[in-house]
Structure formats: C-alpha cells, structure tokens
Amino acid sequence: MQEYDKSISFDGRDIRLKVGRFAPQAGGAVLIQSGETCVLVAATRAAGREGIDFLPLIVDYEEKLYAAGRIPGGFLRREGRPPEKATLTSRLIDRPLRPLFPQWLRDDIQVVATTLSMDEEVPPDVLAVTGASVAVLLAKIPFYGPMAAVRVGLVGDDFIINPTFKEIENGDLDLVVAGSPDGVVMVEAGASQLPEQDIIEAIDFGYEAVLELIKAQREVLKDLGIEQVSEEPPAKDETLERFIEDCATDQIKKVLSQYDLDKKSRDEQLDAIKETVVKEAIASLPEDDPLKVKTTEEPSAVNYEFKSLTKKLMRRQIIEDGVRVDGRKLDEVRPISCSVGLLPPRVHGTGLFNRGLTQVLSIATLGTPGDAQALADDLHPEDEKRYLHHYNFPPYSVGETRPLRSPGRREIGHGALAERALVPVLPEQADFPYVIRVVSEVLSSNGSTSMGSVCGSTLALMDAGVPIKKPVSGAAMGLIKEGDEVRILTDIQGIEDFLGDMDFKVAGTEVGITALQMDMKITGLSMETIAKAIHQARGARIHILEKMLAAIDKPRDTLSPYAPRLLTISIDQDLIGLVIGPGGKTIKGITEKTGAKIDIDDSGTITISAIEGEKAEQAKKIIYNMTRKLKEGDVYVGRVTRIIPIGAFVEVFPGQEGMVHISQLAEGRVGKVEDEVAVGDEVVVKVREVDGKGRLNLTRLGIHPDAAAAARAAVSN
C-alpha cells in the first residue's frame, strides 16, 4: 500500500494518521499520533473455525516502557503481565468496536494496539480506539463504521476535546465518547458530582468531534481508493426458525408472562420447553427429513434459534405491553435491602447490598500510606493509588462451577468502574491519610453487579468510619429498540441485559453523577434517547440511596478498634535523613522500641501508625524531639554517648547530640573529661549555642535548679 499521511485538527491539537509504512502483512495498520504520543494499531482477519456461533474478536492493547524511555523493573527486565490500565484500555477499544461488526460474522478478527511513544501530555487510549476503526476499514473487514472516540474534559466552565493528563487531573470531568454514523455507541466517564444536564451536554459536545473524525476516515478511504466492504450475510434457511416458532411460541409467551417466577424457575421452564417440546418434535421427524438432518449436523442451531425466539417474544412483550418478565413497570426498581456491620470488627467495615436476586458483600480495609499501590510499570503519570477497589465474581454467584483463576478483564473493568464512582467523594488525604481498599464479593448475580458494588462499597466505607463527602448509589439502565419504537428500562436484570440493546450504568450522589458507562449492542443511539436514560436513572439512584441511608445514614464516628491509628507530623525535608539514619538504623530503632509503623514521603510528611494509639503517640514524640529546633537556654536531660579529649558528646534526643566542652563540664578547671562523666551517664545540660551549621554547643554550668528539676520530670513522664 502507498504511504499516506493525513492530519486532523481539534482546537489546535492535531491527530495524524499514517498509513502504508508499518506492518505490511497485517490486514490493515495505521500509526495514529498526537503530540509525541504514537499508537500503532493493526487489524487482521482469518478464516472462521468450524462450530463457532459467535464473533471471535480479540482486542489487545500493549504498553511498552520504551515508549517513555524507561526499562522495565524485575529480574527479566521486560514487560510481563499487562498492568490494569492496559487491560482497561483493551476493553475501551473492544466495547465500541464489537457492536459494529455484522452479527452473522464468524471469522477470527484480532486488533492489536501498541503504544510506541508517549509524552506526558496526550493519553493514548482514545487514539487507540479511533486507530482500531481505521485499521479495520483498511483490512476490508465488514464493519458498520467508521467509528471514532474522543475524550471530553471540563476546565472551568468550558468543555475541551482530548485534554492533557494535567487538564484531566485538574478538571471535574473525564469522559470518553465513541460513536458511529448512527449515533453514540459507548460512553465512559468519571465526574465530580456533575448535574445530569452537564453530562448530557458533554456527550453531545464529544459526539460532534467524533463526527469530524468519522468524516476524516472516509476521506482517507477515498484518497486511497478503498471501498468500504459490505458483504452479504450467508444464506439463511428459515425452515428451522419457523418450525420452532410454530411449536414453542405459545409456551414461551406463557413462561414470560408468569411474573412471579424467579430467575432459576424461568430458566428451567424455558429449558424444558426447548428439550421436551422443540427437540422431541424434531426427533419425531423422519430420519431423512432435511430439518432433522440439519439439526443433527448442527446441534447448536436449535439453541441459537430458540434463544432468538425467546429474545423476540420478550422484546415484543415490553414494546407492546409495557411489562417486563418479572411484572415490573419500565421505570421500577427491584426490591432492595441493605445491611452493615455484618462481620466482626477485625474487618474494618462491611456492607451487604441486595437488589432482587443480585447480592454484593463489600468489605472495607484501612491501611497506612505504605500500603498504597505503586504504579511504576505502566506509562501513565500517576505513580500510586490510595483507593483500591477490587471486584470478585465467583462461579457460584450464578449457580455454575468453573476453576477459580486470577481476575479477568470483566472483574478488572467492573472494579475500575466502582472505584471511579467513589473516588470523587473520598476525603482529602490531608484530612484522612489512610489508604483504603474495598473488595466487593458478588454472592449472587442477576444483573448490574457493578452498580451493586458501588452501593455495597458506600455502605462499607460508612461502616468503617470513612468520612465520605456524600453517599453514592448506582443503577443500570437498559434499552429495547424495535424500528422507531424505543423503551428504556430501569434496573435491568440478567435476561434484559442479555437480550436487550444497551447496558447503561449510572452512579452518583444526590448532587450529581460521579461515573457512568454505556455499552451498546446496536450501531448507535441518539442523544435524545441517551438524555432520557440519564434523567430516568436519577429517579432510580435516589430511590436506592434512600434505602441505603435507612441502614446507615452517615459515616460512623469511630473506627474499628483493629484499624490502625494514624498520626502525622511534618518535618523539614533536610531532616528526613536524620529520622531515617544511616542504613535506616534510626527509623528501625524507633519501630522496634514502639511497635509503630513509620512512613515518610519526600515532602517531609511522616505518618505513624499502630493499632494501639499510645504506641503511635510514643513514636511521634520521639520523632518530634529528634527534629525540633532547639533554642539557646533550653535545659534537657541527656546521655553521654562518647568522650574525646576536649569534651563529651551528649545525646539530647534520639539522633540529636551536642558537645559539652571540657571547660563547660564543671566549675573550675577539669583535668580529664573522664574525671567528670562516663559514657552512659545521664546529665543535665543547657543549650549554650546553636552555631551557623546547626551544631549544638552544650554546657553544665549556670543551670537553675528549677530548670534541672523540670527537665528530669519531663524524662520521667
């Protein structure tokens, strides 16, 4: 392919597309660049495998530390398991890409995005999303695109497109919008309790920029003489579809209209219809019947057509009757119950959230600054996290069995969404210096466990005594779209997520939105429908919040007796070395003496932690005395540490010592220092002088008896 270079400008920020120079054997490849951030995206298609009944799409995003001029740590000195941010970016690319492939496509498709260079200004993730669309189009894969993504920030009162890392950090909004010519296909955002209308305007603002990128991609194809591929779907034999409709429609409709059925009973009855009605009817056909031959050769065909019929009937019931499979109205939330403090106080805080058959247990743990998660081996400027949210989805939560493995993309993504929802309401580090970890254990799942995690975690944080600014709740919205008919569903359950067109999760406080995530199964959604869904979600969020506040209406005033007690003290940066001591000797000594844990950051802030508050106070007192500025005339009790011919060194506080000159040891002439003091003696001394280099000159002369008595009393206390 010929080399081609195109530049697109947004508010003075350029995006460049370079085609034809890299990865010539890939189906399609593009280098997309903004500033000094470059991402190479390649898409490749391979022939489908026998028996596959889904789209086998693989999306991988890779971060290489050479992109920032760094060498990986560890023994191997090469990149290993992807960091969490890379996994989240893989999902960010996948989510708007997947619904734009034809549903009938069964070929293997792989998209690989690799960050080759990254500055400290431009995030690579949205570039990778747009690059994926370009690569797929260049690979001539059937695709209902082009598709593009932009990030929207809010600085002051102004929305900006593709803000820098610093603008994101300092702003009140971090929103990614992806769209196709048919509308918005994906939204992901974190916000500082922004009103619903601000979020809607931000999405609309971002989609306008998306349309510009879509236009630019079409120009690339035109300039290169590439026709966008539009393959015909494989010929479909409707015989099986009509057969299943004729023998199972009435029975399926009957099950879907039994509103008192729980999930398990509904699934069992639908499975029974498939096995005893459909499959038995097929089995009774003559051996040479084409339908029987087809289903014998393709056993999965019956399952596929039965599911399609169930989906069609459920959607029709919602569109025509306005009633859902559990009898709820379209905007009705399932029954909710909440509990806190379920586990012993060894666990610092717990919250149990139930919504219908979805149940999430969240556990909060308070740690010290040294427990913060270091983010050394990824490309992003953030170097550590002090709030960690982990989400677990065991197989028993859906009544299944499978081996337990390390967290997958789903677990990482749901945990990150819940984390993003709660970060805006956490107390400032200066006010609450704890590192906080929340683990959400999904005990039962029937839709929207990520929003259940948000609610359960809010309960756990308040139970742990974390002074959050506002409680956060969340709800998942769904969509059924048939032609021009659109129905928005509040608080979707599993079957509505599985057979519906949208999963739109919205979390926030009574003031505004803190996080949202929208995924589509159709090729786009209008702003009018998105706005309606966001406004409808508010009623659900407030209803859920009221149920949560009935269980605990504010953070507890006290922490668990087993949570560490933290004290902080600030010292001059040039005294950090004094506290640490040579080889860490001083700080280790304080820890051994008091049992407290001590963390020091580069600014000179020292955090002291211990389960028993007295131990933390003891360590704080030692450090305070070590680093306090001594004044001329102050009187202390010290210990003689060493003797030289011209005087004795006396340690006033751990790490702080001064010299008593031989002439200042006693009244009259002193022949030898050893005649007056010995190593280990306790002596009362007065600060005679602090010289220009900070050295202490001490004396034993001229000390008033009352001052000496006070110094001895201070030591005994």
Image (tube, rainbow, N blue to C red):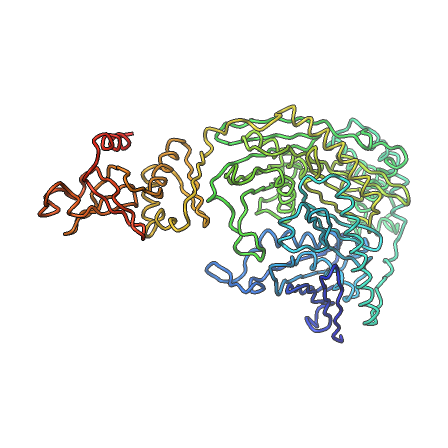
Q: State the image quarter where residue 282 is shown.
A: top right
Q: Residue 337, can we see it?
A: yes
In this rendering, is residue 572 above or below 461? below
Give the image location of residue 385, x and y in percent: 54, 46
Front in this rendered view, residue 433 or 96: 433
**Which quadrant holds the N terminus?**
bottom right
In the drawing, does residue 210 fall left or right of residue 385?
A: right
Give the image location of residue 592, x and y in percent: 32, 40
Front in this rendered view, residue 285 or 143: 143
The count of marks equals 0
What residue do we see at 42% from left, 37% from top? Answer: 609
Give the image location of residue 43, x and y in percent: 72, 63
Front in this rendered view, residue 625 or 109: 625
**Which quadrant holds the C terminus?**
top left
What residue do we see at 59% from left, 34% from top? Answer: 468
What residue do we see at 44% from left, 34% from top? Answer: 565
Q: Give the farthest residue toward the top.
A: 550
Q: Residue 47, can we see it?
A: no
